[in-house]
Amino acid sequence: MKALLVIDMQNVYIGKDHSKFFNYNRQQIISAVNKVIDDNGENIVIYIQNFMKKNFINKFAPFKAYKETKGAELISELHIVSNLIFDKYVGDAFSNNKLNEFLKSKNIDTIEVIGIDGGGCVALTALGAIKNGYNVIVNTNAIGTILNKNKEKYFKKLKQQGAEFI
């Protein structure tokens, strides 16, 4: 069985009033992500939200993604087809043990990843999925990237570890 992980499609990163730090082709990514969600009707669709901890260092970050704030919410344009939402505070969504426990309980063996950023959280989550024994599909049609140098490094590593790219 397959699960689709929709990574970090939140207001602060890609919403209408997103942080200027994130310069994605907003409409193109949102359309592509929504198409993949719509095409995965028979699979489990899971949304991943990235949050920042409220600490001294994060006070100075160029953007804010604190839990229970408007910026941290999933974008309104996103097709929400399930209530399966998991939190994370670092790049790899598998840092949240509840995600892996849920996937195992549903006999998921394949993970497809989409969302933002290909040079960060999407790639790190894909690597985390491989580490946890899943087959991984990286759907490059629905991944936004501003960290291109990181993306190249991570995608090379993912290919070496057997991830499928579509």
Image (cartoon, rainbow, N blue to C red):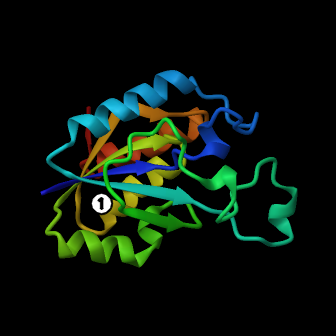
Instruction: Name the one closer to the observer, 126 or 25.
Output: 25
Instruction: Name the one closer to the observer, 141 or 131.
Output: 141
Quarter of image, res 148: top right
Q: Position of residue 117 (x, y in %)?
A: 53, 42
Q: Position of residue 11 (x, y in %)?
A: 62, 44
**Residue appearing at x 45%, y 41% in the figure:** 115
Which quadrant, please, contains the C terminus?
A: top left
Quarter of image, res 108: bottom left
Up/down of 142 relative to 121, above or below: above
Which quadrant, please, contains the N terminus?
A: bottom left
* Helix, strand or loop for disc 1: helix
Up/down of 58 relative to 80, above or below: below
**Residue appearing at x 41%, y 41% in the figure:** 155
Up/down of 85 relative to 11, above or below: below
**Residue appearing at x 76%, y 33% in the figure:** 20
Q: Position of residue 24 (x, y in %)?
A: 60, 28
Left or right side of 28 for 90: right
- Count of numbered marks: 1
Up/down of 141 relative to 107, above or below: above
Q: Residues within 10 Å of mark 1 (few under 14, many from 20)?
A: some
Amino acid bearing label 1: Ile
Quarter of image, res 17: top right
Q: Which residue is mark 1?
A: 130
Q: Position of residue 89 (x, y in %)?
A: 59, 67
Instruction: Name the one closer to the observer, 91 or 29.
Output: 29
Instruction: Name the one closer to the observer, 157 or 39.
Output: 39
